Image (cartoon, rainbow, N blue to C red):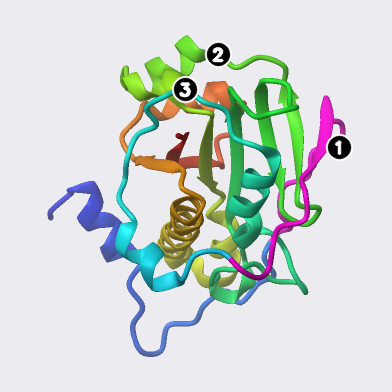
């Protein structure tokens, strides 16, 4: 039997006629009870901005080059598609399980301390977890990617597949990965519209990212988006 992990994954997550899904209730999103600090982001704009077709024609994964900061208003606009509005977020999620979490390694965000933050989607707020941006640690985790030192922030999308698995069984792992693609795509569209550089780094040392964020074994880093100018 072929034991290639990718093929095994897809084989185990197939659905056949007559199969029953668990149909359970998805666990709640992550909540930090005692962050070092909570940073309320400005209200994102709902109107105006660049035309969508012009933005889509300009999207290209480009690394930050100049090491400049970004503003809280720009970050707020970037994260707006990920925020909870009327009980849902701005991207599809199978069964409304929302297995994604978002963390930020903040290096140059105006009026905000460097460090590690968790994005609280319901409050549209940053929760500070550590008070230091470990540049050497992040660069090593990203396989010595030089652009790490030029970025304003690193956006780390993680998956908690058990939320989807509770409803869809092991197929929920597929849905968690699909959802990461939806979310990253929307953030890249927003970054392009704002004239920012966004580069999705999918290749990294998983355990090093896990240590930098303090992730449990049930939560997995999927994509690290380098953001800057």
Identified at 77% across, 36% down, the residue is 127
Identified at 42% across, 24% down, the residue is 66
Q: Given this view, does label 1 or label 2 mark the residue nearer the observer?
A: 2
Q: Quadrant of the N terminus?
A: bottom left
Residue placed most toward the observer, 176 or 156: 156
Q: Secondary structure at mark 3?
A: loop
125 left or right of 33?
A: left
In this picture, which residue range is highlighted in magenta?
A: 27-48
Residues marked 1 and 3 touching at CB (< 8 Å): no
Residue 224 lies in what quarter of the image? Answer: top left
66 left or right of 7?
A: right
Picture disc at residue 33: 1
Q: Given this view, does label 1 or label 3 mark the residue nearer the observer?
A: 3
Picture disc at residue 134: 2
Residue 7, horizontal then vertical, whole percent: 21, 57
Q: Main secondary structure of the magenta part?
A: loop
Residue 139, placed above or below residue 101: above
Q: Spatial distance from mark 2 to mark 3, Cα to Cα?
A: 16 Å
Q: Quadrant of the C terminus?
A: top left
Q: Is residue 130 within the magenta segment?
A: no
């Amino acid at each position: 039997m072929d034991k290639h992990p990718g093929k095994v994954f897809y084989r185990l997550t197939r659905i056949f006629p007559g199969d029953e899904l668990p149909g359970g209730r998805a666990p709640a999103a992550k909540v930090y009870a005692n962050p070092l600090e909570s940073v309320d982001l400005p209200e994102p704009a709902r109107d105006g901005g660049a035309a969508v077709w012009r933005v889509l024609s300009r999207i290209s994964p480009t690394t930050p080059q100049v090491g400049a900061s970004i503003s809280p208003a720009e970050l707020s606009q970037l994260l707006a598609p990920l925020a909870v509005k009327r009980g849902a977020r701005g991207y599809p999620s199978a069964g409304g399980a929302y297995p994604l979490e978002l963390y930020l390694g903040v290096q140059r965000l105006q009026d905000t301390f460097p460090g590690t933050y968790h994005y609280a989607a319901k409050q549209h707020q940053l929760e500070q977890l550590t008070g230091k941006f470990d540049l050497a640690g992040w660069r090593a985790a990203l396989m010595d990617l030089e652009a790490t030192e030029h970025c304003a922030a690193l956006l780390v999308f993680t998956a908690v597949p058990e939320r989807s698995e509770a409803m869809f069984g092991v197929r929920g792992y597929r849905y968690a990965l699909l959802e990461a693609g939806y979310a990253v795509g929307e953030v890249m569209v927003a970054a392009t519209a704002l004239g920012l550089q966004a580069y999705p780094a999918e290749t990294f040392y998983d355990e090093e990212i896990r240590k930098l964020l303090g992730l449990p074994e049930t939560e997995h880093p999927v994509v690290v988006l380098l953001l800057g100018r």
